Image: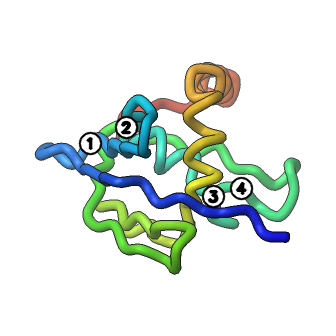
Amino acid sequence: MTEEVTWPKEIRVSPDKKTLTLVFEEEEPVSFSAEFLRVHSPSAEVQGHSREQKQTVAGKQAVEIMKIDPVGNYAVRISFDDMHNTGLFSWAYFNEMAEQQDELWAIYLAELEDKGLKREP
């Protein structure tokens, strides 16, 4: 049995290309900064092939969303202005990130500090 996949009724990139907002039926809109999406890209380049291989991506505070392309009925490919575009952001992944956004951001900031890295380019 396959799980039904629901497309958002609206996908909106802010005029400054720094925020992506998704609106699902009967749910509050959820917004993600371009920086958050870039550093949490589901790509192998960022996530690796195991937890030990996960990368801490620094210097992406100014990154912008250039383009969003649908992938089937389950995901979008986001192209960032740093030329990263290999992550497929599924609706399930967006939901997971929305539920954990504050926690994921705090972990990311702590990793930057622990590794002596910065958000600034």
Dot 2 alpha-carbon crowd within 10 angstroms: few under 14, some 14 to 19, many 20 or more:
some
| Marks 3, 4: nearer the viewer | 3
- Alpha carbon distance from label 4 to label 1: 22 Å
Give SS at disc 4: helix
* Rendered location of residue 59, percent (x, y): 43, 41
Q: Is residue 96 left or right of residue 105?
A: right
Q: Earlier in the sequence, mark 2 or mark 4?
A: 2
Do the CB atoms of the residues marked 3 and 4 lie less than 8 Å apart?
Answer: yes
Pointer 4 residue: 47
Q: Earlier in the sequence, mark 2 or mark 1?
A: 1
Q: Earlier in the sequence, mark 3 or mark 2?
A: 2
Q: Which residue is nearer to you in this view: 96 or 50?
A: 96
Dot 1 alpha-carbon crowd within 10 angstroms: few under 14, some 14 to 19, many 20 or more:
many
**Extreme left residue here?**
15
Q: Residue at x 34, y 67 (%)?
A: 68
**Extreme bottom residue here?**
72
Q: Which mark is residue 33?
A: 2
Q: Amino acid at mark 1?
A: Lys
Q: How is the image coloured?
A: rainbow
Q: Is residue 71 left or right of residue 109?
A: left
Q: Which residue is nearer to you in this view: 25 or 85?
A: 25
Q: Amino acid at mark 2?
A: Ser
Q: Residue at x 57, y 28 (%)?
A: 101
Q: Earlier in the sequence, mark 3 or mark 4?
A: 3
Q: Residue at x 47, y 39 (%)?
A: 36
Pointer 3 residue: 42
- Alpha carbon distance from label 2 to label 1: 6 Å
In this rendering, the answer to whether 49 lies above or below 65 is below
Dot 3 alpha-carbon crowd within 10 angstroms: few under 14, some 14 to 19, many 20 or more:
some
Give SS at disc 3: loop
Pointer 1 residue: 18
Q: Amino acid at mark 3?
A: Pro
